[in-house]
Image (cartoon, rainbow, N blue to C red):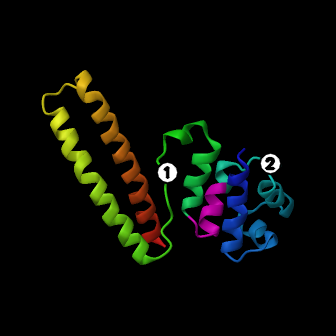
Amino acid sequence: MNETCVNYYKTCRENAGLTQAKASELLGVSERSISDYENNKTKVPDEIVDRMAMAYNTPLLAWWHIKNSSVLGKYLPEIITPKTNVDMAFQTILAQDELDPAVTSLKKIMSDGIISEDERLEFHSSINRINSVAGKLISVVTFAKD
């Protein structure tokens, strides 16, 4: 498992103001298990990450876990956690600015129902932009729930 992922479990716990003892109580696991998770000695089960995300009030922890511990994580867009409401609003504006040209491009490409060879590069570029926007919007929506 990725070392950064393990550190993120610890960071989320500490940001929630919880000791390993309190976290173990909330999660229903031993302090030793918490330590092992945070020191890359034991893989954190999905069910425990789900409880961590709720107990630590960090919904992005679940996303982070899947992105970094599952082979399927490579299909998820990158997300950037907004730090403030202003940052959240700015990410929304940036998402709109990126999305508009990508959608316009896809409409043009797909208007005939065929992606020709000369349209393929622009098509993939537009899809990549939409994927980037998806990450921004997911982070905004998740932040807004807090």
| Residue 18 rendering spot, x and y as whole percentages | 73, 74
Q: Is residue 122 above or below residue 130?
A: above
| Residue 133 rendering spot, x and y as whole percentages | 37, 53
Which residue corresponds to the image point at 41% horizontal and 65% vertical from the top-left? 140
Magenta stretch? 49-58
Q: Which of the pair 66/90 is nearer the observer?
A: 90
Which residue corresponds to the image point at 71% horizontal and 72% vertical from the top-left? 14
| Amino acid type at mark 2 | Thr
Furthest residue to the right?
Answer: 32
* Side of 73 relative to 29 (left or right): left
| Residue 67 rendering spot, x and y as whole percentages | 57, 47
Q: Is residue 83 above or below residue 138?
A: below
Q: Is residue 52 above or below residue 130?
A: below
Q: Which of the pair 82/49 is nearer the observer?
A: 82
Q: Which residue is mark 2?
A: 42
> In which quadrant is the N terminus drawn?
top right
| Amino acid type at mark 1 | Glu
Disc sitting over residue 12 in the figure: none
Q: Is residue 47 magenta?
A: no
Q: Which residue is mark 1?
A: 78
Q: Is residue 52 magenta?
A: yes
For marks 2 and 1, give the CA distance. 25 Å
| Residue 42 rendering spot, x and y as whole percentages | 80, 48
Which residue corresponds to the image point at 65% horizontal and 52% vertical from the top-left? 47
Disc 1 packing (10 Å; few <14; some 14–19; many ≥20):
some
* Side of 84 relative to 14 (left or right): left
* Chief SS of the magenta region: helix
Furthest residue to the top?
Answer: 117
